[in-house]
Each structure stands twice: as C-alpha cells, then as structure tokens.
Amino acid sequence: MLSPQRKWLQDQGFTYIYLCTRRIFSRKCPLLLILLILIVVCIAIQTLLLYKERSDEIPHVNSTPANKHSLQEQNIWMDPHTLSTLKEMQDVQSGQTERNAKLHNQNVKNGQQETDIPSNSVDTTIFHYTGSKTGGISTETFLMLDHQKRIKTRLEDSLAPESDEMSSIASKDTHHTNMPSSSYLVKEKTPTVYTERKCLPAIHIVFLKTHKTASSTILNILYRYGESRNLTFALPRNKQKQLYYPNYFASNFVEGISNRNMKEFHILCNHMRFKKAEVEKVMPADSFYFSIIRNPVDMMDSIFIYYKSIPAFHKTSSLDDFLDWSSQNYNSSVPSNHYAHNILAFDFGFDNDVMSDDKELEERTNNSIAAIEQDFHLILILEYFEESVILLKYILCWSLDDVVSFKMNSRSQRTRSPLLPTTAEKIKRWNALDWRIYLHFNRSFWHKVDIVVGQDQMKVEVAQLRKIQAKLAITCLKEGGPVDPLQIKEARLKPFQYGEAVIQGYNLNPNMAAQTKIKCERLITPELQYTDLLYVRQFPELAAKHKKSKTAGKSQQMEITDLPRKLMKKKP
C-alpha cells in the first residue's frame, strides 16, 4: 500500500507539473521553459549519437554470395561508372562456365589435353580514361594505364606462338581461311566476352597513317570524330600536308609545339615515319596507338600506279618489268625510292632495305614485329575493313555512328587489273619483310576479334554498319557512290590526283537540310581539304598569314610572267 505522499504524487503529479508551468508563464519567466527545452534537445542528440556508435560496432551481415565478392575484386581498377550491375556480371560468369564445360567436353572428345583457365580470366568491360596531360600522372591516368597494360597482356597471352609456316595462311579472298581453325582455337584460352557497357570514350589517339592501306578513310573517321567534339589535332607545321615525311617524325614538326600555343593535343593522325620517342613528346601518356596494314601484293600494285613517277618506276613499262629487273631499277639511296620496297616497314620506322635471301631477314622480321606489338595497341587489316573499324569501336568505347564512312582516295576500276599468280609471288619475295609483318598481324587480328567482340556479334555489327552506310549513301550521295574526278561538280570536293591513278570522289545530293548537308559533306571531304579546314579552325591567325603570303607570291609570279609583254610594249 502506497504512503499518502506517494499516492498524492501518483494522482496529482501531472496536475502539479501543469500548474507549475502555468505559474511560470503567468509570472512571465519563460527562461526556465527555454532551459528545459534545451536540456531535452541535448538528451535526444546524445541518445542518437550513442545509438549510431553502437550500430557501427555491430558487424553487418553480408548477404552477398562469395562469387559476387570475387567478381567485384576483379574490377578494383575500374572506374565506378564502367562497372556493370552485379546481375549482368553473374550472367557473364555463368556463360563463361558453360563455355568452359563445352571446351572441356570438346577436348576430351578430341583426345586433347585440357587447358587450365584461371577463374580470374573473366573481364566484362573495356575501360579507357581520357585524362589530360599534366606534369605528373594523375590517379585516374595511372589506373587507366594499368588497365590498358592488363588488356594488352591478356591479348598477348591468348595468342599462340606464330607458326613458321606463314605461307599456310590463305589469300584475302576467303574470309574464313584467314581465321584460325577450330582445332587451333580449342588450344587457346576461352575468349573473354566483352559486352557494350558504360565506359569513357578514348580521345587521346595516335594513328600511324600508312600508304595505300585505306588510311585516308580512317583519317576521315578521326577528323569527323575530333571536329564534332572540339578536340585538338597535332597538325603539320606551316600548313604542310604531311608531318615532313619521309623524315623520321620529330615533335617540332607539329604546329603549336615550338611556340607552346597548344597546351594539349588529342589526335595525331597525318602521314609520318614513326618514331615513338618523339611522338611521346607531343601526345599524352594515355594515348591509344593503332595503325592499318594491307596485303603487300595488292598494296604494291596500287603503289606502282600511284607513284609511277618515282625514279625506281618511271623507266619501267609494267610492274613485272620492275620486279624482273629490280636490282637495276632500284637504288635505295635515291629520294622517293622507299615507296618501291617494303613501304610498310619503312612507315613503321624500320630499315626497309632487306631482301628475301638475306640471312638476317628472320631476325629483322622478329624484331620488327616485336617493336610494333610493343608500341601499338591495335593493327587493323584493310581486307577486313568493316571488322577492323568495329573492333576499333569496341576498344575505343565509341558508337557505331562514329565509325561509319565512305571510301576515300580510292582508285577507279579503270586503273585496276588483276595480277597474275606469278606476279604475286614476285612481290612476296621482293617485299619479304612487309609480307611477314602482314601475315603475323593478319593472324593476331582475328584472335583479338574473338577476345573483344566474338565472331557472332561481329557478324551482327557488320550487317548494322552496312545498313547505316547504305542509308547514308541514299541520303548524301547524288549518284549513290563514288564517281571519277571529271564528274565531280564542286572543285572543293575533288580529291588530289597523282601518278597514273584515277582517284574518285563524290557529289552531294541537292536540297538537303543544313545540318544533314554538313554531316554528309564531312563524310566526303578529301584529305587535303579537310586538313586545311582543321588548320584554319585551330590556327586562324597563322592560316591568315599563310593565305596572305600565298596571295603575294601569286601576284609576284604574275608580274614576272607579264614582264616580257610589258617590255615589248615599251619598245618604239
């Protein structure tokens, strides 16, 4: 039983508090009430802090399965924006497991030894960071460089040693004969599946523009990509058309380097003779290096027509005539004769003066291939141009629209004729170094397709690319395709003509909308005109000076031409 005092507190407690509070207000002393409120607030805050402290001390229950955790660990170098959802990554790993099982069954069935495939060989995204060039390397650039190195290592590891029987690779006319056989692929690691995901498009790019390899079409792709994104090109100094080719590239060949007007260059893509140490002085450390090569047999045929005026060719009546008497026709010390012998090796910066019967040919070949693989991330193949640009699209994290194109600087069929098999064999022997380089990278190209894209997906994207380009041809081109230079209506769209080749161009459809016309015009603008356009945009003051000096030079030339006529008039 409660005492009278406690019973009173129980019955009258709240009433008492209410009366005290009322008295305080009636006395106009709100200070005590404010103090009371502050005390209550402080107690509440302290309670919340204690609760949070305790909750941090309690370990969270990880409901993520172990396989999810391991997948996340595999992507520690990737930018958060490039990571796919966990479910997507599980699907990729599940598909990898199924392929491994099929591979195992196929190996057992064929009586072959099973290849060990590490569990961490699955990588599900391509990542490129496009950082700016600074005095030091930023954390993002370091991570990107590490990722690029690991991609390159993974590609190299997936390639088996090249066979000495290089001649077993068939000609370009049969697509599948140039691809590795199924039995050869069984011995390889299971290709990594790359799917399109969020990534950062590459903007620091070095393209070695080789000769007569559809490199002008690649140049047009790079020009359009860079111009549409306001990127900066490393253009030839003094408005030259090439980077002082055939000299080895030097950094001071680039406009804006000597006077330090340009803080950063994004794309280097004009003709040059490659020298990595000098290129690195111009381009950022995270730049992507690639080039394109062509079957030396067809390339030699094109070079002979285009460069017919060089000393090595101009006295010969035909390509066979040159090849039969090459020892008399060719002198490596004569200017411009480098076009006639192992031009691919020359463009990549190697000594091209080597014959098929030289004892050092094999060593020179191995050294050249090793140097190219060290310096370049990707080598495209002209004979598979569509597959090449799609592979490039995947690695650079570009879209299909970024790699659409029309053929640029292409020869008319009127100046083409099929080569005899005997002529082809002569070319292979004459350009033995180029031929071996081509065979090696033709093979490794298809391994990269398998690793990065996959054969089935490649077929799908090639069909999509052709569909887009067919629609563009209908929209943009008056005749639906290329025409000979005499049929081109606008002089500014006529490609440069050289040698005995007939270089084709295009006519625009009339009555297009303004934006459509600009897009279509860029697709067909010849190399020299497009280079001039970009130079004017990047260096308007220098371009104006060049134009002024050119005009003055023409005026002076006209005065010299008119001088005899003026003198005749002065005679009595």
Image (spheres, grey):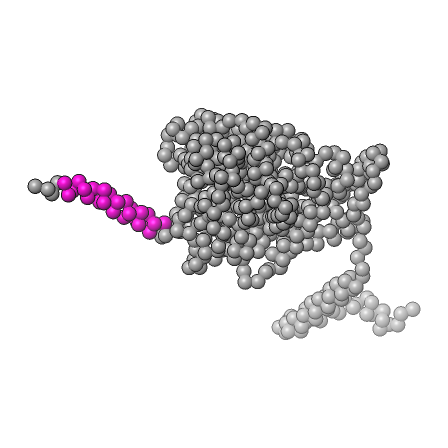
Q: Is residue 464 above or below residue 156?
A: above
- Coordinates of residue 321 in the picture (x, y in percent): 50, 32
Residue 123, horizontal then vertical, whole percent: 71, 46
269 or 345: nearer the eye?
345
Number of callouts: 0
Residue sitting at 57 percent across and 45 percent down? 354
**Majority SS type along the magenta span:** helix
Residue lying at the far left of the rendered structure:
572
Among the 4 quarters of the image, the one containing residue 437: top right
Q: Say if residue 138 shows up in the picture.
A: yes
Of residues 25 and 346, which is closer to you in this image?
346
* Quadrant in which the C terminus appears: top left
Identify the residue shown where x is 81% and y is 50%.
66
Rendering coords of residue 459 (x, y %): 64, 32
The residue drawn where x is 48% and y is 54% is 250
State the residue lying farthest toward the right: 1
- Residue 177 lies, in percent from the top left, at 67, 31
Q: Quadrant of the N terminus?
A: bottom right
Residue 349, placed above or below residue 138: above
The stretch drawn in magenta includes residue 560: yes
Q: Where does the magenta region start and end?
A: 543-568
